[in-house]
Image (cartoon, grey):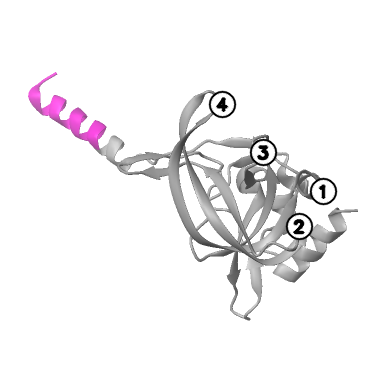
Amino acid sequence: MDRRQSLGLMGIFAATLASANVAHATTARAVSLPDLVRRSTRVARATALDSFARSEDIGGARHIVTYSRMRIDDSIHGPSGDSETLVRTLGGRVADLGEIVHGEAELVLHETCLVFLMIDPNGVEVVTGMAQGHYPITIDGAGTPRLRLSRNMPQLVGGATSAVAQLTGKPFTEARALILGARR
């Protein structure tokens, strides 16, 4: 092989690497809406007002977690007297160190969402089912609040009858009625 052929092959190899796409392959078992409601101690339309991250020991290892102070805008299920709650999600950034947890809910500051919450064994409120228990709410062109898919939603196994399939894209009022119906 001469120099020209070697350079040509190296060019093709470099072009292949440059055009490769990054693949994310997180997979989770889908949770049904009745199961999501049953496992949750609270379901609410809420808005993240503030957040902070820190390192904690979880499962025998040190991890970064983020605590979000959430304003409860509409309590659908569970305690209704609280105007705010503190919710912990896995991952975040502390100084120049960050941790990403694929499949975890991403609570964005000043964004309203529908959130399913449960209390973990340590007494901390967390999102039930991670991203499957989090639905950002946006206003469509007609002014209707609609539920969106959580940003970090993994590929779901058995997702045809899941809470995600039932709630994503629905107007908030319709989603609220589905949740109330699933409590029975």
- Label 4, secondary structure: give it: loop
Point out the tag, 4 or 2, that comes first from the N-terminus. Answer: 4
Query: For residue 79, which numbered disc appears in the image?
Result: 2
What is the CA distance from the residue labelled 4 to the residue labelled 2? 28 Å
Amino acid beneath label 3: Asp
Label 1 neighbour load within 10 Å: few <14, some 14-19, many 20+:
some
Q: Which residue is mark 1?
A: 34
Point out the tag, 3 or 1, that comes first from the N-terminus. Answer: 1
Q: Which residue is mark 3?
A: 120
What is the CA distance from the residue labelled 3 to the residue labelled 1? 19 Å
In the displayed image of the protein, which residue is found farthest to the left?
3
Do the numbered discs 3 and 1 sit on residues whose CB atoms are within 8 Å? no
The magenta region covers 1-14
Where residue 143 appears, as percent x and y from the top left, is 62, 80
Point out the tag, 3 or 4, that comes first from the N-terminus. Answer: 4
**Front label number (2 vs 1):** 2
Q: Which residue is mark 4?
A: 59
- Label 2, secondary structure: give it: loop
Residue drawn at x 14%, y 18% is 1
